Image: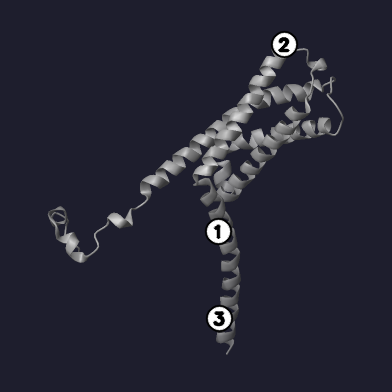
Amino acid sequence: PKAVSWLLRLGAHGSRRRNRISRTERSRHAILAWRLERPYLIYCAACGAVTASLLVWNLVKGMQNNWNLPQWQHHRWEEVTEVSIGVLIVAETLLTMCVLGPRSFFSSGWCIFDLCVAILTVVSIGYGLEHLGRNGEICEANVPLLMLRFILQPGRVLAIAASTYRAHQMQSRVHELRVDFGALPSSIEDFSGPAFESLPELA
């Protein structure tokens, strides 16, 4: 009876552990399934295009303003775009860490780079929210935070471009591994052709 009771407790503990693992695996599967779909690649490309446009916009505005940072003008649409892109970048980094796990995540140079960009992006989000909380255009800028944003923007473009490339490579590999079951032989006699005569016999 004691042995049976011990086995029952062990089975219940194992069942709870399997349920915890299955929930984690389901979450990872859902994230990977989304990243293997073509809309995800389009989403990455769109984020990259918007981020590159913001970088070009700030370069043009800086040249027109002679890089007078204390008098830098902040437009509401610009800050809304900055905050939106920043939230997406931070979310993508956290999801990647969830899929890979901390050990694999921190063993990748690209993942560490993405994490650094995400941390700086959090600061940029706070800077953007500060301006969104005020009315009209702000002419007085916080020079250190504005410089941080200028440093962040090229890194952010590179991070999104790298993510888009990795998503494209991953989807291409998965596409190559797909099997067309409709093209497979429908009966055992179909395996007796010349193409299969040279296969070694199974022991």
- Which residue lies under the disc numbered 2? 64
Task: Identify the mark nearer the N-term, 1 or 3.
Answer: 3
Q: Secondary structure at mark 3?
A: helix
Q: Residue at x 55, y 34 (%)?
A: 45
- Which residue lies under the disc numbered 3? 7
At label 3, the amino acid type is Leu
Q: Residue at x 37, y 51 (%)?
A: 178
Image x and y of residue 110, in percent:
55, 35
Picture layout, residue 102 above or below residue 128: below
- Which residue lies under the disc numbered 1? 25
For residue 156, say whether it is visible. no
Query: How many angstroms separate mark 3 from mark 2 (CA)?
Result: 76 Å
At label 2, the amino acid type is Gln
Q: Secondary structure at mark 1?
A: helix
Q: Residue at x 82, y 16 (%)?
A: 70
Q: Are marks 3 and 2 in contact (CB under 8 Å)?
A: no
Q: Are marks 1 and 3 in contact (CB under 8 Å)?
A: no
Q: Residue at x 56, y 59 (%)?
A: 26
Q: Secondary structure at mark 2?
A: helix
What colour-coding does the image apply? one colour
**Mark 3 closeness class: few <14, some 14–19, many ≥20 residues within 10 Å:** few
Task: Identify the mark nearer the N-term, 2 or 1.
Answer: 1
Q: Is residue 203 left or right of residue 78?
A: left
Task: Identify the mark nearer the N-term, 3 or 2.
Answer: 3
Q: Are marks 2 and 1 in contact (CB under 8 Å)?
A: no
Image x and y of residue 192, in percent:
15, 60
